[in-house]
Amino acid sequence: MIHVGILSDTHLNSCTDSFRRQVDTVFAECSVILHAGDLSDISVLEAFSGKEIHAVHGNMCNRENQQLLPNSKLITVGDYRIGLCHGAWGPRHTIEERVWAMFPEADCIVYGHSHKAVCHRAGGVLFINPGTFQSSGPHGAPGTYAILQIDETDNGKKGQTGLHATIHEVPKLS
């Protein structure tokens, strides 16, 4: 079983000690990390030392990050193709149609931008938006992230049983 940690919209200007503690806690079992953009600063990725990291830039990333990170990328984890992007410009209610058009060959599509956590299947594709990792909203809604489990014993069948994802709240650590 491969565990993939997924986050987006961290909106941090540096890799803080608090952020490091949070990701060490929630992604401890993950060997792969996907960051779906809006890091704000590339130093955020320093928190994932020792893990395979894939990241894309978002609309709130600084110019340097936009030059260093791609807008989107298609990666393979196990036998599955995962499309990773921050989002696609346009109305929020059709974002999944637009990201699906970006990755028609993907088994799973990970995106961010909306700050709304989503995890569901459509047309045989697993869509994951981990929401925003930082607490947000007028009432301090907790941050969220996703864990994707990839069953390597699926033997290349790419069936519904091979990809499982869950959305979690980021714990408040003291």
Image (cartoon, rainbow, N blue to C red):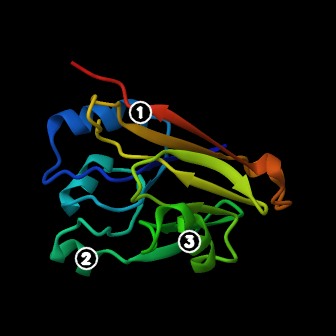
Q: Amino acid at mark 1?
A: Val
Query: How far is the residue under mark 2 from the one under mark 1?
Result: 27 Å
Q: Amino acid at mark 3?
A: Val
Which of the image's four quarters has the C terminus?
top left
The residue drawn where x is 24% and y is 65% is: 60
Residue 3 in view of the camera = no
User: Quick check: 114 left or right of 104?
Assistant: left
Q: Nearer the viewer, residue 21 or 9?
A: 9
Image height check: is 23 above or below 88? Answer: above
Q: Which residue is mark 3?
A: 99
Q: Which residue is mark 2?
A: 66
* Pointer 3 with pointer 2, Cβ within 8 A: no
Where is residue 68 shown, x and y percent of the image? 26, 77
Query: How far is the residue under mark 3 from the one under mark 2?
Result: 19 Å
Q: Nearer the viewer, residue 117 or 24?
A: 117
Q: Which residue is mark 1?
A: 26
The residue drawn where x is 39% and y is 59% is: 113
Few, some or many residues within 10 Å of mark 1 (<14, 14–19, 20+): some
Q: How many numbered discs?
A: 3
Which of the image's four quarters has the N terminus?
top right
Q: Which quadrant would residue 17 be assigned to in this image?
A: top left
Mark 3 element type = helix
Where is residue 144 shown, x and y percent of the image? 42, 38
Mark 1 element type = helix
Mark 2 element type = helix
Number of the front mark, 3 or 1:
3
Query: How far is the residue under mark 3 from the one under mark 1?
Result: 27 Å
